Image: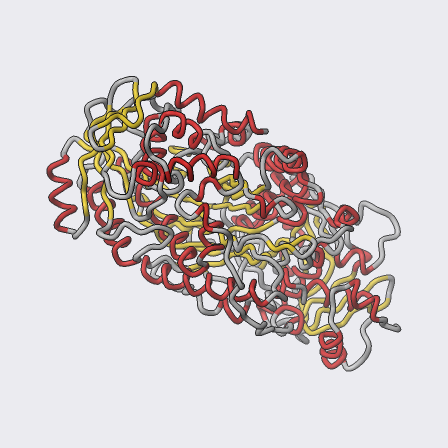
Amino acid sequence: MKVSDELLSQHGITESEYRKIVGILKREPTLTELGIFSVMWSEHCSYKSSRVHLRRLPTRGPAVLQGPGENAGIIDIGDGLAVAFKIESHNHPSYIEPFQGAATGVGGILRDIFTMGARPIAAMNSLRFGPPKDVKTKHIVEGVVGGIAFYGNCFGVPTVGGEVVFSNCYTQNPLVNAFALGIFRKDQIFYGRATGVGNPVIYVGAKTGRDGIHGATMASAGFGEDAGAKRPNVQIGDPFMEKLLLEACLEAMHKGLILGIQDMGAAGLTCSGCEMGARAGTGVEMELDHVPQREQNMTAYEIMLSESQERMLLVADKSREKEVFEVFHKWGLDAVTVGRVTADGLLRVRHHGEIVAEIPNKALADEGPVYQRPLMPPASAPGGKFDLYPFLDGCSSLAGVFLEADANPGNQDYNRLLKLAAGSPNLACKQWVWEQYDHMVQSNTMMGPGSDAAVIRVKGTKKALAMTLDGPGYRIARHPREGAKLAVAEACRNIVCSGGRPLAATNCLNFGNPEHPEVMWQFSEVVDGMSEACNTFDTPVTGGNVSFYNETLGEDIYPTPVIGMVGVIEDLSLVTPSSFVDAGDAILLVETAQLLNGRVDLEEEKALQNFVADAIRRRLVKSAHDLSEGGLAVAIAESCFSNFHRKAEGAEVEIPSRNGVCRDLFGDYTSRIILTTTEPRELRRSAENAGLACLDLGKVGGRLLILKYEGHRAVDIAINELETAWRQGLPQLL
């Protein structure tokens, strides 16, 4: 086959990569082989720009049963139980086709979980969009939220939390990061390995179509004027089919019928086949004429690169092939032997009696190009007007109001400022979003959307799992290394405030074009900051995803690493709400000795978190809420608002005077937690012994939120009025 420069460009293959392909094959590739190399060596599948940096992340720990390299990471939670969890991106598909892009992102991450043998029990998502008043943003938000709700609700997994952020930099590149978590016995883990020469390779699930072809390649390039033309690269999901696939896979696993199993996600049959062979050191031979197809006259190229959803590739013992078929046919699913495990280490593909591809599995899965791309700090970071008030990023009209109040504190209407802050896009209640999700299905949810961390009970035990997603994009754009440390610290803090102890993390690293030295410098700095923080908090990274090329017309997004943190609450009685509980409870502010803005002292932060975790276990804490964007005023207001478990409750608080009224009310200072208690003296004494500051703020109660500053009432507002502004903020914008 004559390979032209244009054909290589269409496949995202460079001239040097093509020479390497020819060297591996010792001949020119067929078109099918060129397509296989293009998806497996794409940025999305090979991590060719990020691999040299990711090696610096800590991936091992006492609780880690499976780190990076499999479909999901796994941790031991005791009692013979394990948890599988992971986060993945579906950014490019969600811009091109918001509904299906987001829906299939959910479907893909759920398959990653049950491929390991775990039943999914919770899902979360981290979403980032352009300014909410932008017409295109409204279309994308509605489609993405609708797609997530459709797939999760139909499949029957609760969507228990996440984050929604608006900023100008995501106008052309929304981020849709999907997280899922499942639970199972730790002696029932399954791996994506093609073991046992002669064993059948069995295709199960939905039929193969032409949707999603070259989806992995599309996710490995930025957008230009032709973004809309990439719509056929987006897959189409069927959650009802996936539910059947889940039950059939778990049944076959429990019957001991499966030796290895792999989701057909990015790169479809290609990726699942070669990765299973590479992990086991075996070959996989496939006959494409046996692959179930829903469209006529599909070529070998199309079948191998299709990313049709709800499909799995599995390996079974050759003596139990018939039993596998019986299980999947019972659930109304296709189950067909499409090949065999071989001893030669090759991915061999036949179609219509001819060999159309013959490639070493390890060359595809493990030996792709690895680039040490140039690093260079950006000439300048984003403008500094949001440094102290990062929640205003993406709403410049409000920024001027707060900067004016900061510069001229006299005669300011702080009631109005608090209402503006509470109703701003990044702080307003996201009920419009999460009320579309079923967050109570499976009846395990103890704390759902709106809490510091979601909490899911582990049935049959006294334990619960706490989980959260965090990614302060603006902070990381300003200081990538410090912002990454802050992201990990805040994720751990959310787990601790909910009554848990953090165990491990997963991450989704969303960045611009890796061919830009500034982007790779940001990436390297983030990895180092994340590594330092994860080592400090003993939270190894069990896996995740890198999403590069989030750029349009040369404009990169903010570096946006999203941290998914999972912790264990060893007793259900330790689950701690973020909202105030009872009138008369004392309100305390516990913080580190240094009041930092946009940075974190990891050792002091760890001391703060250990103190709060211990205080909860000593039954001294009734509620705990960490301070993040919006500062002290917004955190207290959020603690007052009504939720599923309680009516709204006011408070009277004295704000500590340090940096000026506006900064002390709304400044985003780190490493601070609001606690309520009936034992303030004991908490203060313990905090002082731990080297922490512990300030009496006031008491819970009443129908007003009163915030005093230097003896004067800076804020004096009815909770119902403030809560209305908070709840109506986002719907009014959209």
Residue name at image x 25 percent, y 52 percent? 594
**Relative side of 162 to 146, left or right:** left
Q: In which quarter of the image is the N terminus?
A: bottom right
Q: Position of residue 493 (x, y in %)?
A: 33, 47
Could you say which quadrant of the image residue 3 lies in? bottom right
Q: In which quarter of the image is the C terminus?
A: top right
Q: Position of residue 47 (x, y in %)?
A: 59, 65
Relative vertical location of residue 620 with respect to residue 296 in this rendering, above or below = above
Relative vertical location of residue 654 with respect to residue 407 in this rendering, above or below = above
**Relative side of 195 to 456, left or right:** right
Count of marks, rendered view: 0
Nearer to me, 71 or 345:
71
Q: Position of residue 288 (x, y in %)?
A: 79, 59
Could you say which quadrant of the image residue 420 lies in? top left
Nearer to me, 510 or 132:
132
- Say if residue 723 shows up in the picture: yes
- Say if residue 647 shows up in the picture: no
* Display coloring: secondary structure
Relative vertical location of residue 20 with respect to residue 336 in this rendering, above or below = below
Could you say which quadrant of the image residue 701 lies in? top left
Q: Where is residue 159 in the image (x, y as percent from the top left)?
A: 50, 36
Residue name at image x 56 percent, y 51 percent? 88
